[in-house]
Amino acid sequence: MAILTLRKNKIAAALAAIFLFFGTPVARADDTQPLQLFEEKIKSGLIYNFLKYTEWPAARMSSENPLRICLVGNAPFDQFLSPLRDRTAQQHGIRIQRIESSAAQNCDLLLIHRNESAKTAGLLASVKSRPVLTISDISGFADSGGMVEFRTQDNHVGFIVNRKAVADAGIRIEDRLLKLAWSDTGPIE
């Protein structure tokens, strides 16, 4: 019973951190931090939560291999992802690497930066029906077959989820994270 209570407390703490991100408008943390960097820091925190609260197929999760985050494009929030290298999610180490589009099928989480929008169709085709969680901040990403699209609206960062694409890939995002997803028109009040 104590273990169950401890697990519930850890889950509650993680969810509180997520709520903190969603309840806080994107604003300058101080006068020297640009708005965009603060936004990218929030997105990086969300990526970690997607690693923690996404279920990949059992064969993938039973292996000793690390969870692989693959980066395509010159994302300014790469600097905020680097602390994840020393962390674990679901008892797997986290490995972060920059890739060319041909290596996308070897990833667990594929992060496509908005400056690579011309490559989106090819990248999504290369991982179609594979257990690769695709995330991007490209406008219309979820509508074009991507799984998670980051959006900023009214000074808040959030995400929308293409549940069909997630299911087709054999991945499951836990309900506690899905409840935080926005509708296509913005934050759910």
Image: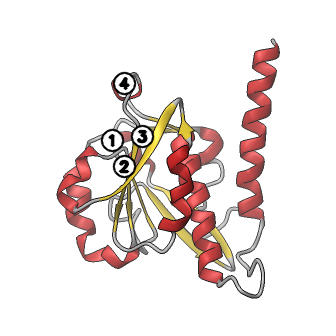
Whether residue 189 is visible to the viewer of this picture, yes or no, is no
- Give the residue pinned by disc 1: 168
**Position of residue 184 measured from the top left corner of the image (x, y, whole percent):** 53, 66
| Residue type for callout 4 | Ser
Q: Which of 134 and 111 is in front in this view?
A: 111
Q: In this view, does 149 lie above or below 133?
A: below
Q: Which amino acid does label 3 sit on?
A: Leu
**Nearer-N-terminus badge (3/1):** 3
Q: Nearer the viewer, mark 3 or mark 2?
A: 3
Q: What kind of element bears circle 1?
A: helix
Q: Residue 14 carries which label?
A: none
Q: Mark 4 points at which residue?
A: 63
Residue 67's tag is 3
Above or below, 146 against 127 in this view is: below
User: Residue 189: x and y, percent?
Assistant: 74, 63
Which amino acid lies under the numbered mark 1 shown in the image of this protein? Asp
Q: Which mark, by number, is residue 165? A: 2
Badge 3 or badge 2: first in the primary sequence: 3
Q: What residue type is labelled 2?
A: Ala
Q: Which residue lies furthest to the front in this view?
A: 86
Cα–Cα span, label 3 and label 1: 20 Å
Q: Which residue lies furthest to the top in this view?
A: 1
The image position of residue 157, as x and y in percent, is 63, 69
